[in-house]
Image (cartoon, rainbow, N blue to C red):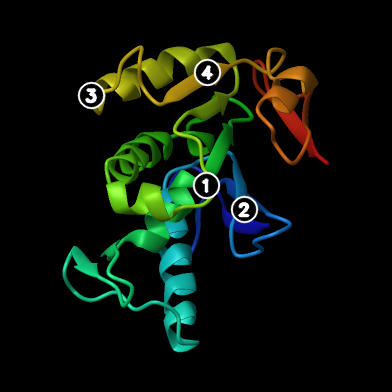
Amino acid sequence: VVVLGTGAAAPSKLRSCSGLLVNIPHHTMPSCGTKILLDCGEGCPSRMMLLALHYQRMSRSKGGEGVGNNSEEIDLEGNETCEDEAWHRLLLELRVVWISHMHADHHTGLLALLQQRELALSCACCCRRTSFFEPKLLLVGPQALHVLAQTYLALIGGGSDSNVEYRNFRAFDTLLQQRMGLPFLLQSFRVEHSKDSHGAILT
């Protein structure tokens, strides 16, 4: 579990708005896995990018695949690589974004996140080299989030056939999660806060 932010209202240099990134490593490939994002306040995508770059630097220091200064190059095995591969892999392994309620500090990072994920999906070499990902990202949250997501998708050029699917809290049930093959169960429960606010239990 990576705490991306705990602040409110606006991000600062050292503290982003609310966001938790959960990684469930694959049992056969611990370096890969399924990721879920719990809330996505302003600044969370930037923190995720910094996290990806940190992992990339660690990999290089341990003798992992190097990536040069060009946007695309060829690795030692003759495969095309991308300088943003670590960041793109993180985005491509993200399966669910769960938004607890409609206060702005919990969802205003979504526009940047969706835009960056569309760019990652357009990078053929990263899609090919990411072991576990599905093009469709599931967005879970209050009913009002659906309208907001449609606005965001329109801004980045998405549409009805986009790579984002919305479900409200009730529709994101155990059966749907099993059909998606998710390696976890996320249960939502009502909390006393603003309208249609929920907490999450991840098992």
How far is disc 4 from disc 1 in space, using C-alphas? 18 Å
Relative horizontal placement of residue 158, taking residue 173 as reference (left or right): left
Q: Nearer the viewer, residue 65 or 147?
A: 65
Q: Amino acid at mark 1?
A: Glu
For residue 182, which quarter of the picture? top right
Q: Nearer the viewer, residue 180 or 20?
A: 180
Comparing labels 1 and 3, the label whose residue is closer to the camera: 1
Instruction: Choose the circle earlier in sequence order: 4 or 1.
Output: 1
| Residue, disc 4 | 166
- Residue at the spot x=59%, y=30% of the render? 99
Q: Residues within 10 Å of mark 3 (few under 14, many from 20)?
A: few
How far is disc 2 from disc 4 in space, using C-alphas? 22 Å
Q: Are marks 1 and 2 in contact (CB under 8 Å)?
A: yes
Residue 62 in the image, given as x and y percentages of width and height: 50, 87
Relative horizontal placement of residue 11, taking residue 197 as reference (left or right): left
Question: Is residue 137 visible to us here?
Answer: yes
| Residue, disc 1 | 93
Residue 32 in the image, given as x and y percentages of width and height: 59, 58
Comparing labels 3 and 2, the label whose residue is closer to the camera: 2
Instruction: Choose the circle earlier in sequence order: 1 or 3.
Output: 1
- Residue at the spot x=33%, y=73% of the render? 77
How far is disc 1 from disc 2 in space, using C-alphas? 7 Å
SS label for mark 2: strand
Instruction: Choose the circle earlier in sequence order: 1 or 2.
Output: 2
Relative horizontal placement of residue 90, taking residue 177 as reference (left or right): left
How far is disc 3 from disc 2 in space, using C-alphas? 28 Å
Q: Amino acid at mark 3?
A: Gly
